[in-house]
């Protein structure tokens, strides 16, 4: 019986197309202007230094911008990139040019799980700031009060079992009392290797099957206290 639910975002709560076709292009388009305008801001300057460290080069600002654009095109899960994207998206959400997507059953299902006493957490390669922004600006309103915490790549990458062990420790529950939901087979395999319960969310034909993991098409098909068997 699960006492907490850990959720992926893309393909699980939110259409992958929203992230890849809306959020990523939005940030890429505004990246250069944002960095030129805010390069001296302490938070932005720290991420610029992190880009240089990860690239292994003493890049000038133009080089940093080109490196970040290349990482976006490669869908690289680089922590400084995710942090800067989150800052750019924050401006878009604030001025109303961005509104995030969640699947229709997600808000009510999350509320039902929360009311049943389950703790809900998000684990995404997007920064914690980006996660909070996404769930704060949905068509169903602000869903952030439903979540007890957020995890990003600072705790580890999503295809590594150790990341899920760290999350279980941070949550304060045995791994076997946490249910992880994702569409990505490698993430599910890593979570299972760490001892978590797992369910694959298969929204459409874009999802690769994950053998050995139970499958559902929607979150409202799951009772976390009695997760489906493989």
Image (spheres, rainbow, N blue to C red):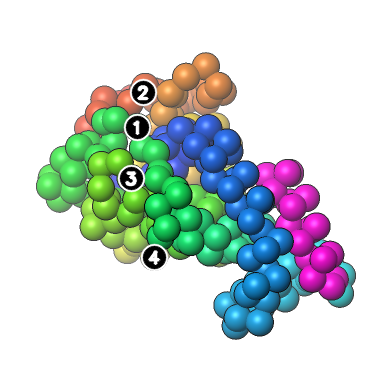
**Viewer-proximal residue, 151 or 137?**
137
**Which residue in the protein does label 2 denote?**
216
Looking at the rendered image, the disc whose residue lies closer to the viewer, 3 or 2, is: 3
User: Residue 41, can we see it?
Assistant: yes
* Residue 103, numbered label: 1
Q: Which mark is residue 170?
A: 4
Mark 3 and mark 2 in contact? Answer it, CB < 8 Å.
Answer: no
- Tags 4 and 2 in contact by the CB under 8 Å rule? no
Give coordinates of residue 158: x percent, y percent. Answer: 55, 48
Residue 208, above or below 135: above
Residue 86 in the figure: left or right of residue 30? left
Q: Earlier in the sequence, mark 4 or mark 2?
A: 4
200 with respect to 111 (left or right) = right
Marks 1 and 3, the one that precedes in the sequence: 1
Circle on res. 128: none
Q: Quadrant of the C terminus?
A: top left
Number of other residues with Cα within 10 Å of mark 4, as a class: few under 14, some 14 to 19, many 20 or more: few
Q: Which residue is pictured at 58% across the width and 48% down the height? A: 26
218 or 71: which is nearer to us? 71
C-alpha separation, residue under disc 2 versus residue under disc 1? 14 Å
Residue at horizontal 66 percent and vertical 51 percent from the top: 28
Q: Read off the residue under disc 3.
A: 138
Element type where label 3 sits in the image? loop
Q: In front here: 45 or 176?
A: 45
Q: Which residues are magenta?
A: 59-75
């Amino acid at each position: 019986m699960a006492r907490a639910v850990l959720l992926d975002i893309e393909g699980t709560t939110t259409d992958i197309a929203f992230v890849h076709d809306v959020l990523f292009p939005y940030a890429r388009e505004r990246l250069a202007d944002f960095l030129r305008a805010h390069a001296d801001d302490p938070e932005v300057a720290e991420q610029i230094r992190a880009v240089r460290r990860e690239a292994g080069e003493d890049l000038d600002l133009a080089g940093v911008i080109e490196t970040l654009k290349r990482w976006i095109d490669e869908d690289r899960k680089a922590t400084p990139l995710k942090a800067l994207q989150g800052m750019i998206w924050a401006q878009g959400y604030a001025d109303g040019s961005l509104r995030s997507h969640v699947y229709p059953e997600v808000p009510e299902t999350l509320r039902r799980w929360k009311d049943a006493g389950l703790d809900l957490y998000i684990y995404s390669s997007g920064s914690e700031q980006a996660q909070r922004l996404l769930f704060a600006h949905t068509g169903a309103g602000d869903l952030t009060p439903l979540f007890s915490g957020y995890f990003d790549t600072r705790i580890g990458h999503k295809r590594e079992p150790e990341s899920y062990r760290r999350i279980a420790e941070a949550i304060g529950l045995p791994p076997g009392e946490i249910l992880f939901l994702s569409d990505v087979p490698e993430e599910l395999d890593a979570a299972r290797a760490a001892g978590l319960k797992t369910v694959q969310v298969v929204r459409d034909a874009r999802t690769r099957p994950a053998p050995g993991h139970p499958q559902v098409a929607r979150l409202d098909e799951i009772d976390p206290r009695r997760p489906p068997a493989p």
